[in-house]
Image (tube, coloured by chain):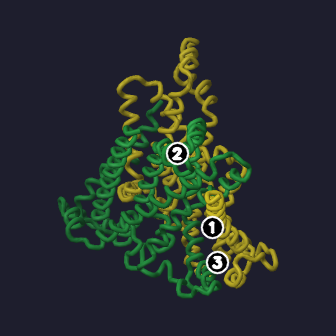
Amino acid sequence: MAAPAALLYGFLYLYPAVSNLLYSTQRWDGVTKPEFVGLHNFKYLIANDLTFHKIVGNNIRFSFIVVILQTLFSLLFAIFLVKNTKSNIFLRTVFFFPTILSSVSVGLIWTFLYNPNFGFINATLKSLGLNSLALNWLNDARFSLYSVAIAQIWFHTGQMVVIYLAGLQQIPQELYESAEVDGASRWHQFRYVTWPMALPTTAVVVAYTTIQTFRAFDLVYSMTQGGPMNSSDLIVTNIFNMAFGAYKFGYASAESIILIIFVLVITWIQRRTLRVKGGEK
Amino acid sequence: MFYNISRRVLLAIFAILVLVPSSIVVLGSFKQDFEIYTNPLALPKHWSFANFTRLIHEGNVLTPFKNSFIVTSFSVVLTLTLASMCAFAISRMITVTGRVLFLLFALGLAIPGQVNIIPVYLLFVKLHLTNSLFGLILVNIAVTLPISIFILTTFFKDLPREMIEASGIDGAGMWRTYRSIALPLSKPAMGATGIFLFVICWNDLLYPLMLITQVDKKTLPLTLIDFRGEYATSYSMLFTAIMVASIPMVLMYIFMQKSFVAGLTAGAVKG
């Protein structure tokens, strides 16, 4: 009964994952005969490829910003919306809305908002007399990565709010009541009840968002294509361009192997630290 | 006091941040370009479906819509069938095979599908499955199987043992138990998983981008990317295209909000 799924998965998921290892040891343009080069691709990527270093740096920065802000906002909004009042339920529906859009749509919408000449953001800034703040959000190497990060946060915060809500609603109400009897301020209630009780949910949100940012592709592809000058390029967008733009299949495979290692190491570190923290409480 | 004010202000800001761009798109799809640039939030001077008809005739948007619909519905139905069978078998297996199978699928959750793009592409070139909707369906199934099996196995393991055992005592085999007991009981879980899969497949860009080049085989996200070049200066057309691409999702969200939210969050939590 498990056979059809197992076969299909083995053939179209596990087998490619393994053959990826083989491709990563080759130099290959996809047309001529592949040439075996051992670990050369990896050596070059790690020691010499400055663009790749920049891109890994971009991805780490992108992850940090998105993970921290998205987790912070979603926890905050979940705390704000935890009671099942009519207005709260309506706001949850509104906040969740971007999640149902396709990433390409989100990319196109934000490309319009960011447009330096007639985009909504700059038009608003100019009408407020803040002409100096009306920047070239996507085409300036200093801002492009952060501009994409903002779109990413806009896109996924609502989904994380819902996950936090499920976690917060399981916190026993008595804990808050007794905290109030003890005269605990709102901050203290957060610090000593909400935060420790929501820690397992935070672990899920952080882990999920981290993985999401390391496999991000669609938004960058539809907003900046990684430009200008690789300033918003991420690992997966670079793998794609390396393979299907530059036809360096072996090299791109080596990049994917490095990405797998990255993701596994990060997942492992997060599991460990969050388990240690879980033990504390 | 301070808390209440800041709560209201922050909630209002984020609500505006969601509602303003959405309104710009919805209103923009009924407007002409200059109206979008001069006053994006104003109501259109004349409500007109001209953009939609132009997009259908000139942009031929119905073909990618149809392709997306075929690919998504087949992917979702087949993945749910294969995944529920497999998950049910795993949840009933106490042997090593069950554990090994589960671990293999869990491995698929740890390795993001994106790292497989090159070997999958090369394999599909060999199998002549590029530029084929069937190929896209196969990829979708393979990529979404791990998460679906993960969600459904957890669900099947929580089913009351007695019901399954009773049906075994009554002489029902594995298949019979799956069809008559497990499937009917798992409707909500299957519904939520199905919606989650629907969103993933409908919105997917990476695999179609890599596997499809023929115009008549393109899916909606790919066509949107093409439109970005074609209508680079015409946001009224782009907004209309976004509307067309989002309508199925929005309708599902309105009519099945509970399962929708449940599905998308289950996918995130379990993944």
Of the residues shown, which amino acid type is indicated by label 1?
Leu
Chain A color in figure:
green
User: Residue B68, percent across and down?
Assistant: 60, 58
Q: Residues within 10 Å of mark 3 (few under 14, many from 20)?
A: many
Q: Which residue is depicted at the point 59% across and 78% down?
A: A121
Q: Which mark is residue B255?
A: none
Q: Tell me the SS state at disc 3.
A: helix
Of mark 3 and mark 1, the one earlier in the sequence is: 1
Q: Residues within 10 Å of mark 2 (few under 14, many from 20)?
A: some
Work out whether residue A279 or residue A201 is closer to the camera in this orientation and state it: A279
Of the residues shown, which amino acid type is indicated by label 3?
Tyr
Q: Residue furthest right?
A: B46
Mark toward the viewer: 2 or 1: 2
Chain B color in figure:
yellow
Contact check, label 3 and label 1, Cβ < 8 Å: no
Give above or below for A119 relative to A189. Answer: below
Give the residue number, with chain letter if any, for mark 2.
Answer: A194
Q: Which residue is depicted at the point 41% across and 23% down?
A: B94
Q: The numbered mark 1 sits on a residue in which chain?
A: B
Give the residue number, with chain letter if any, for mark 3.
Answer: B235
